[in-house]
Amino acid sequence: MAAGQRIAILAERAPGETRVAATPETVRKFRALGADVAIEAGAGARAAIADADYAAAGGEVGDATAVIAGADIVLAIQGPDPALLSAMKPGGWVIAGHDPFAQPARVAAYAAAGLEALAMEFMPRITRAQSMDILSSQSNLAGYKAVLIAANLYGRAFPMMMTAAGTVSAARCFVMGVGVAGLQAIATARRLGAQVSATDVRSATREQIVSLGAKPVFVESVAGIEGEGAGGYATEMSAEYQAAQAELVSSHIARQDIVITTALIPGRAAPRLISDAQIASMKPGSVIYDLAVAAGGNVEGSVPDQTVERHGVKIIGYANTPALLPADASALFARNLYNFLSAFWDKEAGKPVLDAEIGDAIRLTQGGKIVNARLLG
């Protein structure tokens, strides 16, 4: 059997990033596969994981230089600076959420360094890859946290309350975009007692909305537009549909207290869902949480990591919402990474060996070149 793979985990260096790509649980599991695992000292501190916990799980804790030396695989939340990886083995794998459309220079640098960059956000949305899907695991937490933050900013209660002093009406919450984040936002707002409605360009989501006890809000006058793209992602809509949707949303949004927007299109700027005029139609004291703010925003005037007030409405959106739940976000992301590598672990070779279906989908660079069709096309 070949010598064990060396897996390295560095502390995340991106501003505001609190997550870490391995936990003591996944370190133990990688060790059970026969791999050696090295973790940079302090890498888990912001996710409430002590260096001693990694050491107890069988990990080697050291400085960045020692951790990277001779590494076959680097696991990360966000793609690390290629300059940090110079001591990796030639052809080593760098597995992370690489944000390749927004970070072309970094991807090119991986290629120039002879590294194989694997983008976890390009994971195909197929049944066998569900447990490897970082977009789903992190979006689930983001949808939950968005509702909690909006509830905290909202100056009233969410549930209906009947008291001796009178009745407090339930808040009205509208979720725009019913992917993983939107579904969790619906469920969370319902748990808090709000009256919840939701919309999406994909007609197939209607049943999911109803199943969670929310009211579906859909364009009925424009037929034959499903909005379903490859792999279950939303696609851009026709001008006719966009006009009809804007009219419907305008009448509905004016009656809402909380709006959560979640619409993203891979590789494109986030679609604009709420205009300044629509914000102006809302009641003073209402709150909008823009989960797409880092991709340009669904809401006119939203600013990453700032609370903006327009027409008496508070608009907020964090560029990295999952990082506000670092312990759980790290645990889920780390399991996605372990599930991915363990599914392809070849015991005889002592390392993971990818197949074409998933390997070709997520591989960005190989042999000194950028090879991913989505980046070349």
Image (cartoon, rainbow, N blue to C red):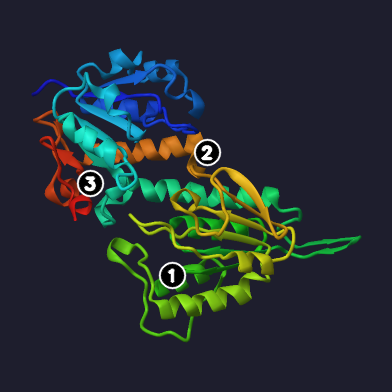
**Residue at point 45%, 33% (across, down):** 19
Q: Amino acid type of disc 3? A: Ile
Q: Label 3, on which residue?
A: 362
Answer above or below: position of 89 versus 364.
Answer: above
| Residues at marks 1 and 2, CA–CA distance in whole angstroms | 27 Å
Residue 138, image x and y in percent? 43, 46
The circle drawn on residue 325 is 2
Between residues 146 and 239, which one lies in front from this camera angle?
239
Q: Is residue 145 visible?
A: yes
| Residues at marks 2 and 3, CA–CA distance in whole angstroms | 26 Å
Horizontal side, residue 171 vs residue 295: left or right = right
**Residue at point 71%, 57% (across, down):** 158
Answer above or below: position of 171 versus 144.
Answer: below
Q: Residues within 10 Å of mark 2 (few under 14, many from 20)?
A: some
Answer above or below: position of 172 versus 180.
Answer: below
Q: Amino acid type of disc 1? A: Thr
Q: Quadrant of the N terminus?
A: top left
**Residue at point 36%, 57% (across, down):** 268
**Residue at point 51%, 44% (across, down):** 321
Task: Determine the secondary structure under disc 3.
Answer: helix
**Nearer the N terminus, badge 3 or badge 1?**
1
Q: Quadrant of the C terminus?
A: bottom left
Q: Amino acid type of disc 2? A: Leu
Residue 173 quadrant: bottom right
Foreground label between 3 and 1: 3
Residue 28, image x and y in percent? 32, 25
Q: Label 1, on which residue?
A: 205
Between residues 98 and 103, which one lies in front from this camera angle?
103
Question: Mark 1 near mark 2, Cβ–Cβ under 8 Å?
Answer: no
